[in-house]
Amino acid sequence: MKKIWVIKPLDGHFYGYLFQKIDKVFRVKGPQKISARDLKNEKVLLLIEDKEIYFQRETFTRGPQEIIALQINERLKNLGLAEQISSLAYRLEEIRGTFVDVSYLALLSCHVEDEIKQLISSEVRLCGIQHHAIALAGLSKFISQEIVLLVEVMKDGLWLVISQGENPLYLRYYAIPDSQELTAHKVEEALLAALDFAHRGLKKEVKKILPLGPKREIIPSLPHLKSVIPEGIPFENHQALFLEPAFFGALFAPKGFDLTPEEHRLWSRHLRPARYAALGFLFLALINFMGWFYFSRENRELHGKIEPIKQEVERMRYHFEKILTGQANNFSKFLEIEKRFSQEPRFDLFLAWLSQNLPPKAHLRSFNAQKKPSGFELTFEIICPGSFSEVQRAFRELSYKLDSQNDLKKSRLSYEEKEKRGIFTFEIIPHVP
């Protein structure tokens, strides 16, 4: 039987449900208010409900995770959102040659560090942090593979989620000012706006709607939308699913959008091995104590028979300590490598900048880095197809950008008339951290 809590912060404590899985069905207990101390040693999934979010699916240049994250942050910076970002999660959707489609979720005003520290200090086994809207999208897997609009009516607004299977496509919170009342007309306006985005922006037609929330009866019926309910829900009692659906959907949230900070992921990953190590030491200490107690009461004639057992225990303890010492040495080496890496110039940042400033259809043919007294010197060649005038103009523009951002030492243009292409050769000292 598996057991996990799904909770959210509430007035200095937490509020949520306990899910116990028996075979393929979850038994649900709750909702209830609970403290972090009462969740000690329990598996917990934290749910957050930041209403100021930015969700998008865009195409970026393919590269390592760091390069993709850098491009996402650059896009958010261009939108004027970079300074507001408190958490960011993304996943790769589709790779197409040198490009990759990425879905990313940015939280603009969520601060749950205190709650996370409270859980960690109480020795809670934090399994993940999911956003409310992503959790709602998890319910769409029970409505076949068709695209569906999930609408949860709250006290001061409504969540609108368009999802298909396990792929969230649109997440938005429609807020109602304090001075206004949430009416069926306002809900209809929000629904039509979401459907228009699906038609124009996603090129998809939504034909199904899943009404959720304690005030879901206010959702008006639209002629082209069919109201549906999830099928095959693995809960014994799922009435609360329609009242507080995010707690239930969080168990099936689409992968890739976990908002747990990296340092807390490392803590959770090493918590269980540390416990096993502590139990191992306790077990060895208990064996030693029992051996001493036993030997003290036995006749000396039995000492020769018991001694081999004690030696075997000592051998096991030595072997166990040797393994732990090796792991500690490996970890120290890892920290040293990470330190040296952090002190090296970040050529990946320069390459990311270069890929965004290359002329159309141009590509990098060769790249070389050499350490000089004045710093690292980069030599690289770029192939740029086009007529001579086009290539010459592109060469001037790129040279100007390189010189303004770096220390440009040499630049040379060669044009191959037969191939209708230019070859740019540059030598620079990059201005990278």
Image (cartoon, rainbow, N blue to C red):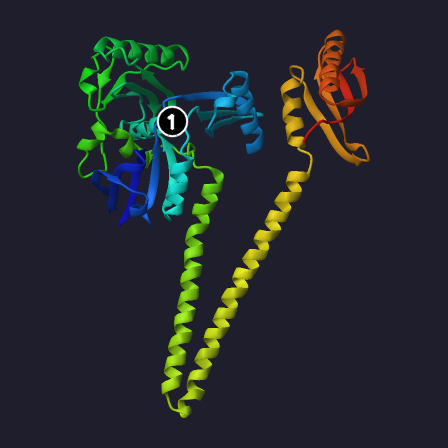
Residue extending furthest front?
Answer: 12
Image position of 186 with respect to 325: above or below: above
Residue in the foreground of this view, choosing between 205 and 304: 304
Image position of 203 with respect to 67: above or below: above
Is there any visible trace of residue 372 in the rendered image?
yes
User: Which residue in the protein does label 1 denote?
Assistant: 167
Residue in the foreground of this view, choosing between 199 and 180: 180
Image position of 400 with respect to 342: above or below: above
Give the crowd class for mark 1: few <14, some 14-19, many >=20 residues within 10 Å. many
The residue under the point 65% across, 14% down is 360
The kind of residue on which mark 1 rests is Asn
Residue 22 at what x, y percent from top left? Answer: 23, 47
Is there any visible trace of residue 24 in the rendered image?
no
Residue 309, quarter of the rendered image:
bottom left
**Quadrant (top left, top right, bottom left, bottom right) of the C terminus:** top right
- Which structural element holds mark 1? strand
Residue 366 at what x, y percent from top left? Answer: 73, 28
